[in-house]
Image (cartoon, rainbow, N blue to C red):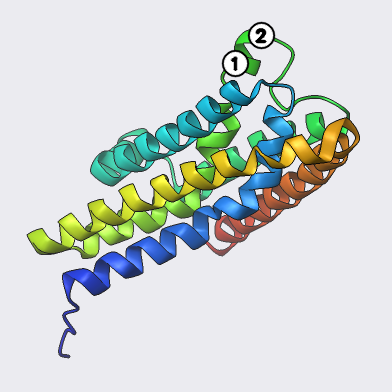
């Protein structure tokens, strides 16, 4: 069977579009707003940049060493997905019951850019698997360069979307923030349940 070789530009565009759709920055916006509503405008912008940076770091780590890490620890992608789902479910319950999604401690509250924003919300199992597959499929230097450009571009877009979204908080006021938090909690719970169901299906099929 003849293998179809695509250009580096096409590969880069496919990588960018796939990762952008999977990571879904617009879809993460309500959850981000709910988590940073009690922060100052400057802190919100910093958290948006940190979330993008954490996501980029996680994606890069798994792109380079993902297969080795999972193989060494004997962890399946389904197990990783289930763990991420349980973490998101815990945070969603906090948002639904009037919390901030960052737990009770100050240190947890200060690091919401790490968890759940950077990972597993943005750099979740889907994005990690997609990146690992793209790395495996890249077989020329231009394709590797295109993949790097795609990953960087996606995270620049993530930072831009999250930073721009913070202006919404000026309009919706406190009552709106409460509503956004509840909606975000519901959305996050739905995402978590879907991730868990998908992981269970993989376990059952195995």
> Which residue occupies 27% across, 65% down?
12
Query: Mark 1 to mark 2: distance in Å?
Result: 6 Å
Front residue (pair 31, 119): 31
Neighbourhood count class around disc 1 (C-alpha, 10 Å): few under 14, some 14–19, many 20 upward:
some
Q: Residue furthest top?
A: 106
Mark number, residue 110: 1
Relative placement, left or right, of 80 versus 145 is right
Is 141 situated above or below 193?
A: below
Q: Nearer the viewer, residue 145 or 157?
A: 157
Secondary structure at badge 2 equals: helix
- Residue to which mark 2 is pinned: 106
Q: Residue furthest left?
A: 141
State the image coordinates of residue 69 (x, y, percent, origin top left).
Answer: 31, 36
Q: Is mark 1 on a helix, strand or loop?
A: helix
| Front position in the image: 50 or 104 | 50
Q: From the top left corner, tell me how far across and down residue 50 is, in percent.
A: 47, 29
Badge 2: few (under 14), some or many (20 or more) residues near its Cα, within 10 Å? few
- Which residue shows up at 51% across the image and 36% down it? 119
Left or right of residue 2: residue 127: right
> Which quadrant of the view contains residue 98?
top right
Q: Which residue is drawn at 60% across and 59% down?
A: 204
User: From the viewer's perspective, is 104 left or right of 21?
Assistant: right
Q: In which quarter of the image is the N terminus?
A: bottom left
Labels in figure, total: 2
Q: Where is residue 122 in the image (x, y as percent from the top left)?
A: 52, 44
Where residue 162 sits: x, y (%)? 56, 42
Discs 1, 2 touching: Cβ within 8 Å: yes
Q: Can residue 71 be seen in this view?
A: no
């Amino acid at each position: 069977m003849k293998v179809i070789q695509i250009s580096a530009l096409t590969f880069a565009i496919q990588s960018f579009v796939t990762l952008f759709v999977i990571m879904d920055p617009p879809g993460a916006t309500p959850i981000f707003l709910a988590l940073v509503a009690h922060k100052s405008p400057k802190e919100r912008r910093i958290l948006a940049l940190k979330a993008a940076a954490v996501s980029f770091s996680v994606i890069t780590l798994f792109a380079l060493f993902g297969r080795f890490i999972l193989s060494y620890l004997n962890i399946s992608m389904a197990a990783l997905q289930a763990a991420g789902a349980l973490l998101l479910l815990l945070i969603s319950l906090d948002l639904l019951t009037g919390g901030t999604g960052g737990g009770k401690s100050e240190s947890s509250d200060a690091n919401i850019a790490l968890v759940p924003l950077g990972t597993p919300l943005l750099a979740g199992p889907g994005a990690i698997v997609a990146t690992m597959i793209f790395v495996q499929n890249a077989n020329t230097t231009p394709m590797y360069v295109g993949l790097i450009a795609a990953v960087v571009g996606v995270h620049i877009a993530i930072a831009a979307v999250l930073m721009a979204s913070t202006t919404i908080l000026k309009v919706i006021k406190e009552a709106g923030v409460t509503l956004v938090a509840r909606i975000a909690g519901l959305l996050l719970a739905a995402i978590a349940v879907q991730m868990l169901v998908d992981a269970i299906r993989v376990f059952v099929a195995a």
